[in-house]
Image: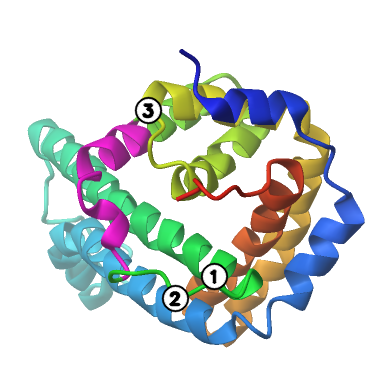
Amino acid sequence: MAHPIFKKIEESEKPDFGDVLTNGFNAVKEMLEPAILHGLLNLLIMIPVLLAVYIPFAPLYVDMITHLGDSYYQPEFDYTLSFMILYMLGIFAFTLVAQVFSFALIAHFYAVIRAKDLNLEKPAGGYFSYLKGSFGKIFLINLAAMGIATVAALLCYLPLFYVMVPLQLFTVLFAFNQDLTVSDLIRAAFKLGNKYWLILFGVIIISSVIAQLGLVACFVGIFITQLFVHLPLYYAYKSAIGFSETTH
């Protein structure tokens, strides 16, 4: 039996582009504190990934700085092919695990947005409560997302613009429909994304550009402002599908 989300998508109403953006941006001030807290936690999640990326090459960087300006400089460090393969596999593993925790954190952020929007009680559990009993599912969702994005990028990047919308819908669909299987969630994301692709693409692009203002705050700010991308997406989801008493 098909999950009810598919019927909701079929019967959904077209989100109003202007209303979605307006509601999202109007909620920024109210969501500032949760965005800061979630953004800082997201930054902490990414620190191990950044360390894994740069630490293996630290001796090379130091050597290059030491010989800066030396026209006859030859690097003393020779990284073998086996090292580079292990390095790439390690970065992939670190990134995937970090993405799992980031995914759960953003799902919690969506729950906080909904609670404030509908004047509901604060979501029970901690910031990573979505991991409880769902770690494997979130892991597979993110593995699938990375696979889809990689294939799209290999196809001359143009398909990446198409899959961008469904991929952005993974988290909001999971946050409010935790009973979805991985395959159903992917199907629902593409079904909803296909139906309102142009509107959702515009919302994502505009809110993403504005979110880049975090670069002004010495780069660290982007981990906070990037969360505001999810505010318009929340209102797009609310407008198209809405919530019921059984919604998680």
Q: What's the residue type where badge 3 is placed?
A: Val
Task: Indicate which disc residue 115 carries.
Answer: 1
Magenta segment, prevailing SS (helix, strand or loop): helix
Q: Estimate the spatial distance between the alpha carbons at disc 1 and disc 2, rounded to whole Å.
A: 6 Å
Give the class, few, some or many, for how many residues have Cα within 10 Å of label 3's Cα (few <14, many ≥20): many
Identify the mark nearer the N-term, 1 or 2: 1
Q: Can residue 226 be seen in this view?
A: no
Decide: is 170 above or below 159.
below
Q: Quadrant of residue 27?
A: bottom right
Q: Estimate the spatial distance between the alpha carbons at disc 2 and disc 3, rounded to whole Å.
A: 27 Å
The residue depicted at 82 percent of the width and 41 percent of the height is 199
Task: Indicate which disc residue 53 carries.
Answer: none
The residue depicted at 44 percent of the width and 75 percent of the height is 122
- Residue labelled with disc 2: 122
Residue range in magenta is 127-143
Q: What's the residue type where badge 2 is placed?
A: Lys
x, y (%) of residue 102? 36, 58
Q: Which residue is at the front of the view, 119 or 70?
A: 119
x, y (%) of residue 73? 24, 61
The residue depicted at 37 percent of the width and 62 percent of the height is 105
Decide: is 79 above or below 43.
above
Q: What's the residue type where badge 1 is placed?
A: Ala
